[in-house]
Image (spheres, rainbow, N blue to C red):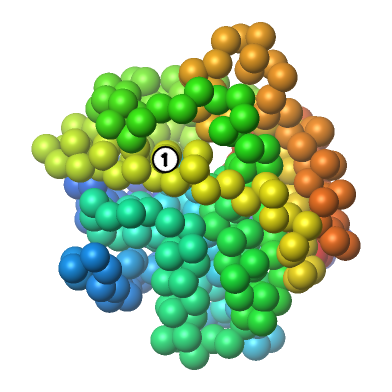
Amino acid sequence: MFKRISLSFLIFCAPIVPALAQIPDTLSITLENVPYAYPVKYFPISVEGQDLRMAYMDIAPTQMANGRTVMLFHGKNFGGYYWSGVIKALTSRGFRVVVPDQIGFGKSSKPFIHYSFHQMAAWNKALLEVLGIQKANILGHSMGGMLATRFALMYPEQTEKLLLENPIGLEDYRKFVPYVSTEKQYATELKATAESTKKYYQSSYFTVWKPEYDQLVEIAGGVTNSADFPRWAKVAAMTFSMIYEQPVVHEFINIRVPTVLFIGKEDKTIVGKGLLSPDQQALYGRYRLLGKQTAAKIPGAKLIEFDGCGHIPHIEIPTEFAVALLGSL
């Protein structure tokens, strides 16, 4: 009983984004004016003739160090800032936690390059090596789930467990979502505003909107006011194409590491959903079915489902998610 009460207190005391009042209406596209809960460092990367910086947090356990590491991969519309509660839960139970902002996201560089899950996986493996970590548990949310899957397929020896939180890519979007060129998607991304961002978050991510979720919109909407927003939008379009063109769904059967799926059953996420008619939308993105189907494809996978929860369990039901995550580790 004491552990449950302690964990609940721990999670609810961790804000989604720290010191929100300091975040202005206009943000830089590398979020220099967004505070993260822990110190941010930078890992240098050279690719396609460009010198880049990959931001990351490396957080030591706060007690009872167990010698194990968890690496957290964020979703497409997020960065390391939304993992604060999960980090606190893990470090309090002895885990070291590494939280990168992938290249093109968060505080990391926003280059015009060929975006690839294979290349991202290689960068994250290189980061682990620099940090002296030989093996890690890999937790990926949304797009981070696609990346985590690719990482586990490429580097099974470095993957202790694969942990997938409402990952996208559980179906092949190429089969039912019309193709859109990166240039056309760029034009769509340029139309984003703080208002449209909030509307999207309200309709797509949570079953019931709560005021604290505005913290996420402050960041995602704040970059739309930046003078550099066109670069952000171009990168967003390029990573949209990466997701569409580089599915992992056909390779789940090849996963050879212990895997756990954490699925909010009310999630209805479809990449490119706006390109489908309402009738078509109703046929896809049904996570209450996709979770079961995916678990059946991955040898020995465990499925944990959450009733009344949407796309981001670690924020919508933080205590329940943390208990399930720690139990799985």
Is any atom of residue 32 visible in this view?
Answer: yes
Q: Residue at x 30, y 44 (%)?
A: 235
Task: Please give the name of the residue rendered at 39% of the width and 68% of the height, measured from the top-left corner.
Answer: 56
Instruction: Please provide percent x and percent y for residue 2.
Output: 81, 65
In the image, taking residue 286 as reference, residue 54 lies left or right, namely: left
Residue at image location 50% in from the left, 39% down from the top = 244
Q: Residue at x 37, y 54 (%)?
A: 115
Image coordinates for residue 305, horizontal then vertical, percent: 81, 43
Residue 133 place in picture, x, y as percent? 54, 86
Asked if 238 appears above or below 114 in the picture, the reply is above
Circle 1: residue type: Ser
Quadrant hosting residue 273: top right
Res 316 visible: no
* Residue bearing mark 1: 241
Q: Which element is circle 1 on? A: helix
Left or right: where does residue 290 sit relative to residue 137?
Answer: right
Check the picture and name the quadrant holding the C terminus: bottom right
Res 281 quadrant in image: top right
